[in-house]
Image (cartoon, rainbow, N blue to C red):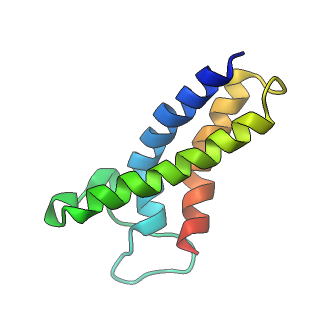
């Protein structure tokens, strides 16, 4: 298993998960915010209203993906690729966004 392949998986799968559910959980403040997670801007809904949202999405998505690549170095040669993909999906769509919301 190649480290480069794992890093590419983090970037592609990680940004896809960040696009669909990660960013809304991290920064999607609803009208009545709760203490657990956000809930608006799913799949970039409403981004054309304020163009700065695109910049914020990309900047924060890079940090989210970086979290996955750091762990890929620690898990090098110790896990199978399927397990790493599951970890990447969980990290970029649930774990990292909820920590950012708090």
Q: Position of residue 81 (x, y in %)?
A: 69, 22
Is 48 situated left or right of 84 in this image?
A: left
At 74% from the left edge and 35% from the top edge, which residue is drawn? 73
Tell me if residue 100 comes above or below residue 18 in the rendering. Answer: below
Q: Position of residue 7 (x, y in %)?
A: 59, 30
Viewer-nearest residue: 101 or 74: 74
Viewer-nearest residue: 15 or 43: 15
Is 75 situated left or right of 26 in this image?
A: right
What is the quadrant of residue 50 in the picture?
bottom left
Is 47 situated left or right of 7 in this image?
A: left
Question: Which quadrant holds the N terminus?
Answer: top right
At 28% from the left edge and 56% from the top edge, which residue is drawn? 54
At 39% from the left edge and 47% from the top edge, which residue is drawn? 19
Tell me if residue 83 comes above or below residue 45 in the rendering. Answer: above
Q: Position of residue 70 (x, y in %)?
A: 68, 43
At 63% from the left edge and 49% from the top edge, which residue is drawn? 67
């Amino acid at each position: 298993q190649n480290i480069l392949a794992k890093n590419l998986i983090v970037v592609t799968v990680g940004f896809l998960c960040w696009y669909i559910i990660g960013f809304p959980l991290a920064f999607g403040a609803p009208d009545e915010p709760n203490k657990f997670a956000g809930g608006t801007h799913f799949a970039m809904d409403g981004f054309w209203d304020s163009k700065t949202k695109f910049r914020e999405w990309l900047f924060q998505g890079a940090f989210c993906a970086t979290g996955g690549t750091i762990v890929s170095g620690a898990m090098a040669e110790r896990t199978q690729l399927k397990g790493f993909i599951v970890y990447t999906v969980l990290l970029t769509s649930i774990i990292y966004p909820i920590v950012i919301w708090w």
